[in-house]
Image: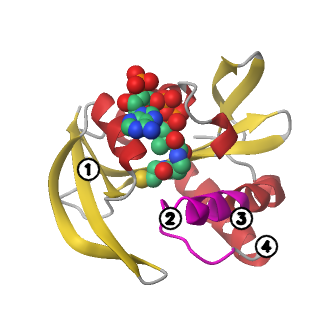
Amino acid sequence: MKPGQVVDSFLVDGKKIVLRCPRLSDYKTVHKFFNKAIKQSLSAGGQLNRITPVILKEQERWVANAVEKNTLKKSVYLLGFSNQSVIASTTIEKNPDQDSGHVGDFGIVLLEEFTGKGLGTKIANKIISVAESELKLKIIKLNVFGRNRRAQGFYKNLGFKEFGRIRKGINIKGKYTDNIFMVKYL
Ligand SMILES: CC(C)(COP(=O)(O)OP(=O)(O)OC[C@H]1O[C@@H](n2cnc3c(N)ncnc32)[C@H](O)[C@@H]1OP(=O)(O)O)[C@@H](O)C(=O)NCCC(=O)NCCS
């Protein structure tokens, strides 16, 4: 997929949300977004793998890597914009192993103020259908924390089913919770 390619747009509370591929120049707004999302995650007891803030240089490299993987059909990485600011990020990465190229890993994050309005469901359905056609995927898998009941309900609604868990597999600042694995067959 091409840098900046628009995939869809949605209306949330009368505001237009544009879902598109990242461009190299997006790294500053992505940086603001991730550091806000990490803070929100920690104040909810931990929802994301990342705990420490991201530094700008690291974010720049990360966006460049995402742009390259999108172009090479190794992933579908999409950003949700409200005006010129990133408010959502989602990715499906194709498994790099030769025998597992039909399997993808899914992740999604919205800023808290955009949650609970059906936007996550719209974005997830879109990225799954784009990844199915662009990356030729047949199976999508993910991990979610035991403490994150909202995300578990969200994924179940999308048709994901738990296939296993590592008890106390997640440690957020000394507090342990299960690492739950879910799968959806397309
Ligand atoms: C998880 C997330 C992507 C869901 O997106 P969203 O836009 O908030 O979800 P939607 O409004 O589309 O809700 C869809 C479903 O989620 C479930 N859900 C939402 N809030 C819930 C809650 N508090 N408890 C249980 N299930 C809940 C419901 O099944 C809901 O369907 P319903 O409205 O028909 O009942 C979003 O809340 C988010 O980014 N959270 C912070 C980061 C995060 O946890 N990411 C996932 C890491 S694994």
Pair 3/2: label in front: 2
Image mark for residue 114: none
| Residue behind mark 3 | 35
- Is any part of residue 126 visible from this angle? no
Tell me which amino acid carries mark 2: Gly
Tell me which amino acid carries mark 1: Val
| Residue behind mark 1 | 103
Q: Is residue 39 magenta?
A: yes
| Residue behind mark 2 | 45
Tell me which amino acid carries mark 3: Asn
Around disc 4, counting alpha carbons within 10 Å, would you say few (fewer than 14), some (14 to 19), or many (20 or more)? Answer: some
| Residue behind mark 4 | 56
Pair 2/1: label in front: 2
Q: Position of residue 182 (x, y in %)?
A: 24, 49
Give the spatial CA distance, label 1 vs label 4. 31 Å
In the image, 25 versus 112, the foreground residue is: 112
Q: Is residue 114 left or right of residue 47?
A: right
* Number of numbered callouts drawn: 4
Secondary structure of the residue carrying numbered label 1: strand
Give the spatial CA distance, label 3 vs label 2. 16 Å
